[in-house]
Image (cartoon, rainbow, N blue to C red):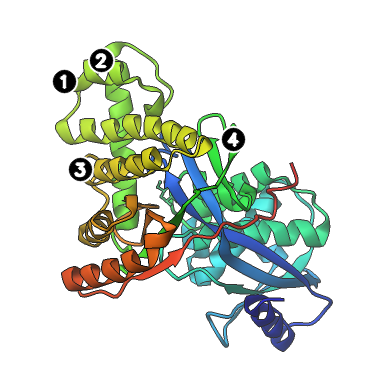
Amino acid sequence: MNGFEETALGLFEERFSGGTELFFAPGRVNLIGEHVDYNGGRVLPCSLSLGTYAAAAREEGVIRLASADMPGEEVRLALSELASLPLEPAAFARFGWAAYALGVAAQLIRAGYSFGGFSMAVCGSLPRGSGLSSSASLEVLTCAVVSGLYGLGLDGVTASKLSLAAERECAGVNCGIMDQFVCALGRKDCALLLDTHTLEHGYFPFDLGENVLLIMNTKKPRRLADSKYNERRAECELALRLINERLEACFPSLCTVTPEALAEAKDALPPAVFRRARHAVTENARTLAAAEALGVGDAALFGSLLSASHASLRDDYEVTGRELDSIVRAAEEQEGVLGARMTGAGFGGCAIALCRKNAAREAVRRITAVYKAETGLDCEIYTAETGDSPFGRAL
Ligand code: GLA
């Protein structure tokens, strides 16, 4: 048992009773395919060895939740009360962190699954607020707990859809399906290529040869992320509508628009909206190229695609910001670094860099120093380790 499992179990024993079972759901890092999962594009994330652990047991008619991050606090709600809550953010806001777990339970009820109450003590190993999907991890974990305790036999696609519904309707974040999907279905030592339009997916060996993937936490809180996220979504919807109108076409999503069609419709789009669309179209192509590069072990090409993705997110999509640009530039300047980019929603959180193993130690030292000098912030840099997810092997 690792330290996080021990903490979850210790917390459970302190607060609750009953024969416990242990569960885990990972966080994620997205290698490439950013801000395209709500545009029907392809994404290439990995599930991490970092994630959220739970010790859980059945209860009679009530849900009881405790978190190692919130000592002394217990959230308690009767199942009957949960079943009568409207599925909207205002009804769940008062539960704080527990809204994600309760949101999933509410979605399971709405979907017609039959289960009783449960108590669950959680402990996470993901750095907080870092953009490595702690919320999707907790949602998928709750699916695994309820399914495990009550033998619901949930599959990963269903678990990710229920988790996404909880995130959108109960937590009020109008995100795409990437995070929930990879937290439910990712596999250790693999990257998952997902077509978010069809949900077709496949696994690529996450084998970087002589290289490692660094995760660089800027420690910049992602305050702007939610409002700008919704703004970008709206701009993408506008772009799709204007392109279809101008070309009398019916592209179902922005990422299905070809580069030629985009060029033809350019005049119909306000300049900023055109750039958002150009990001979506080019990023979708880069993701496929990156998956192929990973498949044939072409690390140099993979690295250059990471850097091209960052440039597009910075210049066309405008979701990077000073800290992410600083850490990515610092990484790209180092000997042995093949490419770098922001990962996740942007405006803060984490970036990644592909780096030769034998140059990594010195690169980390120098990136940390340059970033500190430019921003005054102390970043944290870890080597990415992939991990299994609760539904990833069951298919
Ligand atoms: C957040 C969202 C995802 C995705 C990324 C950007 O992580 O939760 O659905 O849109 O941002 O790629």
Within 10 Å of the Cα at label 1, are there few (<14), some (14-19), or many (20+) other Cα atoms?
A: few
| Dot label at residue 315 | 3
Q: What residue would you read off at disc 1?
A: 267
Q: What residue would you read off at disc 4?
A: 201
Mark sitting earlier along the chain (1/2): 2
Residue under the point 32% across and 31% down: 282
Q: Secondary structure at mark 4?
A: strand
Kind of residue at badge 4: His
Mark sitting earlier along the chain (4/1): 4
Q: What residue would you read off at disc 2?
A: 246
Quadrant of the frame with the N terminus: bottom right
Q: Secondary structure at mark 3?
A: helix
Residue under the point 79% across and 53% down: 114
Location of residue 135 with respect to 207 vertically, above or below: below
* Residue 64, image x, y percentages: 68, 74
Give the alpha-carbon distance from disc 4 to disc 1, as whole Å: 35 Å
